[in-house]
Amino acid sequence: MPHISLDSLIDFGDSAAYRKLPLPPPYRDHGKLVLDPAALRTCIATAFSEIAYAMPESQIESFRAIAADSEASAPERVVAHYLLENAAISAEGIFPICQDTGTALIYGWLGSDISLADDQDWESVFIEGIRDAYLTQGLRTSQLAPLSMLEERNTRDNLPAAICLRPVRGETLRLLCVAKGGGSTSRTSLTMESPAILKPQTLRTRLEERIAALGASGCPPYTIAVVLGGQTPSQTLLTAELAALGMFDSLPDHAEADGMPVRSREWEAIIAEIAAKTGIGAQWGGRHMAVQVRAIRLARHAANLPLAVAVSCAANRHVRIMVHADGWYIERLADAADALHGLSTTLAGTMPVLAATEVTIQKDSTAWLDVLRSLPAGTIVRLSGPVLVARDAAHARVLAMLEKQGSMPEWFKGLPVFYAGPTEAKQGRRSGAFGPTTASRMDSYLSPFMEHGASLVSIGKGGRSETARAAIARHRGIYLAAPGGAAALTADRWIRSVHTIQFEDLGMEALRIAELDGLPALIAIDAQGRDFYAR
């Protein structure tokens, strides 16, 4: 029986979907195709610069479909419009699509008849290109490197990257460059199952649990990939990661027990139905939690049955590259015109008008808090006024102050806290890309902070734990979910200013004050502890 390699099944699509880059072409030397390291570095920098601001046209189409779907909920249609507008604004190259400009990932398939001039190291050149993109574009640096087992520090250049370069036959280099945000990565899960789940209803029940657990914190609408089987857990996870990016779309739907993996359209329909029934929708409730689904079955050892679930979020930033004797080619991404195409014509008048309560935050008044406390979960509000901007590291530092001194700084009290880490503002701009991070990571801080009059109102994305709900109810607090995956739109339209006030050494996690200007948000947990997402 011939061996079937997963690497041979990777789908790089139609060559018509690519454009040629103006780089020095490869040349032949001693029977091999030789690439110029400087050209490779430029190619990588181009890829990561472009995906910070643009995404595949298929993703834009998915937003259009939700916005135009008469059966979709009004809130998720509004979110889809926000995502379309966000794509158009980010494609202008000022504000990145998402404030989390991601971990840089490169998956590569290196032909055996290709070499790099001057015997340079492939990974080193990739890293140089990634560093160029993140530093020249002013993209957020989110990588923390260890100082010890428990201590860490931001690397300030978004490195290290994750690079997986695999050898294949031929004289073509194929690369998949991905900027993967932390929110969607944290939705990845792997379990080792019993073969007893290989029954229709049993597998369906298991998938219902796993898909419901995805929640909204990874910024739906998602592409959901489910992979069952695998020779090792790592193979299962890698296949799920690549499947969520469309890299196994050409698999057959049936095989002859020869090791060929299969893609099941039947189970994709089942998974899509399960996702719709969660009611999570495109963040604010509805049926469009998933815009695409991939279900793949791999071979396995008789004693093992891995099951992996992975997602790509609304930002879904990736691009494919092919290098061969004819030159350097990169996949075309949607531009601003593509993003807005149809929004003002085909979709004209389709954006629902959501009733929203205007709330103006004032430092020396509690009237705004009284208004929020009077509103039930599921209410849309528009927030104006000052908010603290703080996330993981700032919260940890304030908690350390509280534990050491028995009190916290007064400046941490009296205002809502927006869980965010924006990108740096470009010249002449009042803010960088600005959007919420996953609120549940701050759950353990709520009770001690609320007891001292801080974090009574918090703004983030996704659901929260029972512990957080209990603390919010006990202190009559409020948790608001802001639109995720719309950081360019938020910065351009709903942020008046952002200023760093403390902890500058934390980089993107420094403590800031932001002035909001009508930011739309959903009351996800109200002052009585009623939870929109749990409902």
Image (tube, rainbow, N blue to C red):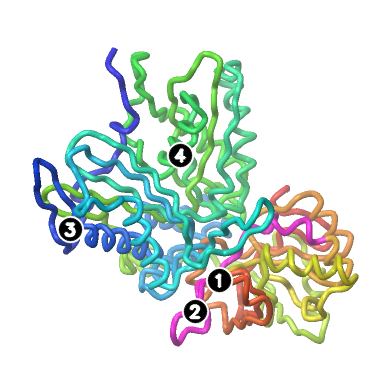
Amino acid carrying label 1: it is: Pro
The answer to the question of whether label 2 and label 1 lie on touching residues, with beta carbons closer than 8 A, is yes
Q: Do labels 4 and 1 touch, CB within 8 Å?
A: no
Kindly identify which residue carries mark 1: 422
Which residue matches tag 3?
Answer: 20
Q: Is residue 374 above or below residue 320?
A: below
Residue 351 appears in the figure: no
Label of residue 128 in the image: none
Please tell me which of labels 4 and 1 falls first in the chain: 4
Which residue appears at 23% of the width and 50% of the height?
A: 119
Residue beneath disc 2? 425
Is 67 displayed left or right of 447 in the figure?
left
| Residue 195, x across and y down, in percent | 57, 17
Cα distance in 3D space between marks 4 and 2: 36 Å
Compare marks 4 and 2 and give the one earlier in the sequence. Answer: 4
Q: Earlier in the sequence, mark 3 or mark 1?
A: 3
Magenta-tinted stretch: 422-446
Dot 2, how many residues are within 10 Å of its Cα: few (below 14), some (14-19), or many (20+)? some
Q: Which residue is mark 4?
A: 293
Q: Is residue 402 one of those drawn in magenta?
A: no
Residue 436, magenta (yes or no): yes
The 10 Å Cα crowd at callout 4, few under 14, some 14 to 19, many 20 or more, is: many
Residues under labels 2 and 1: Cα distance?
8 Å
